Image: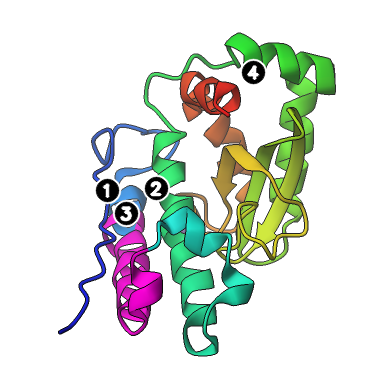
Amino acid sequence: MAILANFSLPALPYEYGALEPYIDRQTMEIHHGKHHNAYVTNLNAAVANHPEWAEKSLEELLANIRNLPNDIKNAVRNNGGGHWNHSFFWKIMTPKSTGEPVGQLKAEIERVFGTFSRLKEDFSAAAQSRFGSGWAWLIKKDDSLVITSTPNQDNPLMDIADVAGKPVLGIDVWEHAYYLKYQNRRPEYINAFWNVVNWEYADELFRQS
Ligand code: MN3
């Protein structure tokens, strides 16, 4: 009997065009409906071949990339990472951004980076300098904050991450995230991203665990 792996594409928490003019509707439609959907489909196909892994949560899979069977290791790394990263990305953005950090996260940003402006500079630099496809992250690590970046669909929850921690903010810098509107101008996309950050959710993530 086939095991039905049951990862599924989460609905966007807002309309496709809600992040205009910063992130355009067509990019969101393709990014969510095609790219993210493909990661989910491919992840389900991979774990379906290994019932003992198909029962694990996504976070458990990501924490065990090294231990996965060789025939699905890369598929779970790329597609499980892609599924987690995009599920996170949709929620860390909102059309009703406060425009600046709030709560305990705000206090910790000011303690670690001095000012919000400095955090923006450092995070934007990490996003800009990530060569090729990948992500930049602000993570909770040892109860404080660290900026890091990962290639492809890797993330700081993976056992193979150079810098491990819990994401509280992240930006997708794959070209598919911005090319339709910004073409090769990644810095403009990164600048625009600050207008749609869901700081209330980021603060919630920082306060948890
Ligand atoms: Mn993407």
Residue 48 position, x and y percent, is 30, 79
Separation of marks 2 and 1 at Cα, in angstroms: 7 Å
Start-end of magenta stretch: 31-55
Which numbered marker is on residue 105? Answer: 4
- Mark 4 residue CB less than 8 A from any atom of ligand 1: no
Looking at the image, is mark 3 or mark 4 earlier in the sequence? 3
Residue 203 position, x and y percent, is 55, 20
- Furthest toward the left, the residue is 1
Q: Residues within 10 Å of mark 1 (few under 14, many from 20)?
A: some
Left or right: where 149 falls relative to 87? right
Q: Is the residue 174 above or below the residue 105 in the image? A: below
Foreground: disc 3 or disc 2: 2
Separation of marks 4 and 1 at Cα, in angstroms: 26 Å
Foreground: disc 3 or disc 4: 4
Residue 44 covered by magenta stretch: yes
- Mark 1 residue CB less than 8 A from any atom of ligand 1: no
Looking at the image, is mark 3 or mark 2 earlier in the sequence? 3
Amino acid under label 2? Ser
Separation of marks 3 and 1 at Cα, in angstroms: 9 Å
Looking at the image, is mark 4 or mark 1 earlier in the sequence? 1
Q: Secondary structure at mark 1?
A: loop
Residue 86 position, x and y percent, is 43, 51
Q: Quadrant of the N terminus?
A: bottom left
Left or right: where 190 falls relative to 46? right
Q: Are marks 2 and 1 in contact (CB under 8 Å)?
A: yes
**Can you tell which quarter of the image residue 19 is in?**
top left
Amino acid under label 4? Leu
Which numbered marker is on residue 87? Answer: 2
Residue bearing the label numbered 1: 10
Left or right: where 147 falls relative to 186? right
Amino acid under label 3? His
Q: Secondary structure at mark 3?
A: helix
